[in-house]
Image (cartoon, rainbow, N blue to C red):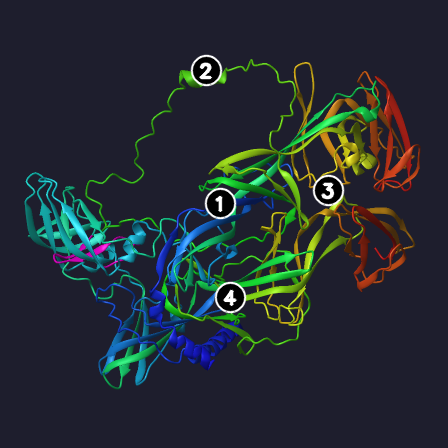
Amino acid sequence: MRLLLFLLMLTAPAMVWAQQLVVSPAPDSVSIAIYRAPDRRPGQPIDRNNPRGYALITETRTVDLPPGDAKLRFVGVAEGLYPESAIISGLPKGVIEKNRDSRLLSPAGLVDAYLRRSVTLERTNLVTGETRRQEAILRTGSRGGIVIDSADGIEALRCSGLPERLLFDGVPEDLSPRPTLTVLTSSDRAVRATLRITYLAEGFDWDANYIVEASAVDTNKPASAQKLSLFAWLTVANGGSQAFADAQLLVVAGQPNKLRRGRQPQSPPVRLTLECFPDQTTSDLPPGYAVPPPPPAPATAAMLARESIVVTGARMASAVPVAAIQAAQEELGDLKLYRVPEPISVAANAQKQVAMIVRPMVAYRTFYRATVTDNDLCCGDGAARPTERVLRADNVQRDGLGLPLPQGQIGVYEPSDYGPLLAGQTRIEDTAVGQKVELALGRRADVQMQMGAPDEKRPREFEILLTNARDRPVPFELAVPFELLRGEAFAKVDGVPTWTGTLPANGERRIAFELRKPAE
Amino acid sequence: MPTSYAALLLGSVLAIAAVQAAHAQPQAAQTPPSADQPTAGSAQGDVALTIYQNGQSLVQDRRLLGLPAGRSRQEFPDVSTQIRPETVVLSGPGIGIVEQNFDYDLLTPGALMQKAVGETVTLLRTNPATGAQTRERARVLAANGGVVIEVDGHIEVLRDDGLPVRVIFDQVPSGLRARPTLSVTLEAARGGTVPVDLIYLTPGLGWAADYVALFDQTVGRIDVEGWVTLTNNSGTSYKAASLLLVAGAPGGGNQPNYGRRTAPSPPPGSIIRAGTETGTRERLGDYILYPLERRTDVLDAQQKQVSFLDVKGSLARSSYNFHVDGFTDGEPASASSVLKFSTSARSGLGDQLPAGTVRVYMKDASGSPQFVGESNVPATPMGSDLSIVTGQAFDVKVQTVVEQREKRGDARWRTTMSYRVSNASARPITVELTQDGIYGDAQVIEQSLESERVSADSVRWQVPVPANGSTSVTAIFDTRY
């Protein structure tokens, strides 16, 4: 304690003032690793106006440090910077302290900084154009109008109806144009240092956007010959106003924990509102009397024409693009990292796409699926309902896949004589190697399931009619998530009794089963 | 008096003692100008800040006052704009306090005019055609909605004609101030320059710890850097202040928390075993003190960070856990990635950790550290075993299936569960699999792997899973529900 006290006395406050300001205008190189918005569900698109993910940004900067203490200001860092996450390495004697200052240079900021200080007041004579300057002292802060004290006496600024303006001698050193990161450091001698600055910043997001092109079901070929082409865009969005040129771009898949973060210190109010004395006159209009707004402008010819444009270009042959570069996947602990192989620019308020997955030959099978529900057993009305078309693939090397699939949106296309048609839009969760991939493409009216209404006399026995209006046989899976006493050709899939079979072309199948106990 | 407030006061008294010990010798403080006198700069003297983690802070401001002998009223500008005036304590040699006031009648053009009602002001009218100025005296009769004045026996409304009129007041009425002002009437035994200590509590200043943990999985070590993150939202800057940060929050649970972290965020890191070691840090009762070595400026709207911990190569290991709540079927779901380390001296870290956020980084293939997740840690004594959930593992999934569920008698159920733990990564792992929600008198009748009954409600398996493989565990439970 005594030693500390002694040290305190040695480091007099005067030392704090002997700081030189060193400004680092821009990074030499930047690497950006983007993390997905933690609360965005699979399939939910990026909110481009307010991306809720974040990024780990690593910059290298070169600075010339003077001997002694120096205050280092970093310009051009992402505006969503979390200052508590900033790590700065490469300083000769390390970091004494890091600061994020958010007192902004603004009309109100200037007035507050000059409170009780002398400013110049300039008045312009409206007739002669002549200006007159005089010294005045600000007697109030920025809230609720300004009172000035000059040789003439005490007056309120801009309450006389005459042109008056304040002139300030300089910019107060505490105020900055935008929130800044500064570091206090020290060096024995003048030195050129290469710094690495790493920080987390909000206002970024990424997603995987898959394009699947499935060949149409062809029953003449064996099922194993059916292939689909899987392609994925790596879509990144930067919602901030800071652009990053020639950056190394990485994205991280998986779910790292991210805590909800409290508000950063905010700048004091920046708007200056000059309130005056009560200023009603004897001829003021009553409140609420307003001129009606003008009617909206009529639609222009250009606007009308835009609505009737028809695209007549040639149909593209495939929905899957050809990638020139592709992000490479690496392991990162329990997460997956994707690295874009060459430097690219991440512009401000922009979204960007790079290929991340290209798998042209993936074995898959397609089938129709229906599930018996509680409602069917107790109070079904016996009506037919369409069943769901599903694509299924195994995420294994043998089947042409076998790589981590990060969560995202999927568009499934099928070729047709008119070019690829969108067969369905769905989503995928984070899928590890070895897991199965199931894409539900929506309900199809051609294949229907009809379950008889429950019979009070035989409450445990049910029959289901499956109908197929297509001109070829279709595979079908019927799940009955209840315990069965009897059921032909039922087998357990993930614990659920499931009937797997084929519906004949333009035909039907009847499936009967008996529950172990009646529905409640 | 509510208990929490008493605790807060007790904490303050302790802290005052600490601050006075730490800052016993005053710096050569400049004589501050009086509040009424226009001046540049701050009226603060030698400032010492003691900042707690619950958003309450103690400000000790040693000013030099030029006092007349006897009774005088002294103003103290440049105190925190969020000052809790009821907590102010002023003390100095030979000084007795008569009364303390906190005035927040602010000087604005409107207030200036209100206070001028009944007084005489000067009007300076400008002729818009010729620019000629005429000066006349006017009496302000009222300022309600508009200003009614009496000039030369006529009554008129100020600027009724819309022409420019400057209103010049003779003086600023006493009692109107630029900012809320603390004033103290005191009685001095002798006149002269006297050092006084002004002590008060203010919200708006707070701190938390932020940790950077760089984890090297191959050798099982972490490098931990600890940073104190100090936030000033108090509306006031403190120049060249000496700082003391206190880990622990003195009562005041009912005080609004102005600190940076308000919402608790699950899942937090948890202390598996609380430590029993004592570190070398300075202590004050149950609080741990973090004094800053040098004086610093704590500016308004600033977030400041200062290092307090830097440890290399402390032992750590990664692990996985998965909780199944009740007997339910589930799609394959990711297990949690867990980082386990100890704060004991033997493992290398050897320090207590103030409550804060741990951000975990790992190196990618090119050697740059990348963020792999973060978690809150509670205030952790030295020697504790910590377990932090950093995220969900992409490659480690658990699928649960209720194979069979049978009713046995009135209030007995027999449930067959199977758990498939898969590992798509290229190294063998062990997953800590916990079945929760089995309730009191439950039994495991049969199981494919030896389990541990960790509580009445839970059983736990340590499931070894080979690289790029999977392990299935089955168990039959006999339960009441």
The numbered disc on residue A356 is none
Circles 3 and 4 on the same subunit: no
For the C terminus of chain A, the image quarter is top right
Decide: few, some or many residues near mark 2? Use Cα within 10 Å; few <14, some 14-19, many ≥20: few
**Toward the viewer: A477 or A133?**
A133
Q: Determine the secondary structure under disc 1.
A: strand
Q: Earlier in the sequence, mark 3 or mark 1?
A: 1
Image point (56%, 65%), residue name: B310
Q: Is residue A512 above or below residue A515?
A: above
On the question of residue A51 being in view, the answer is no
Q: CA distance from mark 2 to mark 1?
A: 47 Å
Q: Determine the secondary structure under disc 4.
A: loop
Q: CA distance from mark 2 to mark 3?
A: 49 Å
Image point (58%, 50%), residue name: B368
**Toward the viewer: B149 or A88?**
A88
Q: Can you identify the residue that label 4 sits on?
A: B54
Q: Position of residue A95 (x, y in %)?
A: 46, 61
Q: Earlier in the sequence, mark 2 or mark 3?
A: 2
Number of marks present in the image shown: 4
Say which of marks 2 and 3 sits in front.
3
Q: Is residue A53 above or below residue B195?
A: above
Please state the extent of the stretch shown in magenta in the rendering: A139-156
Q: In the figure, residue A119 lies in which quadrant?
A: bottom left
Q: Is residue A155 magenta?
A: yes
Decide: few, some or many residues near mark 4? Use Cα within 10 Å; few <14, some 14-19, many ≥20: many
Q: Chain of mark 3?
A: A
Q: Can you identify the residue that label 1 sits on?
A: A29
Q: Can you identify the residue that label 3 sits on?
A: A432
Q: Is residue B149 magenta?
A: no
The answer to whether B243 appears left or right of A107 in the picture is right
Decide: few, some or many residues near mark 1? Use Cα within 10 Å; few <14, some 14-19, many ≥20: some
Circles 4 and 2 on the same subunit: no
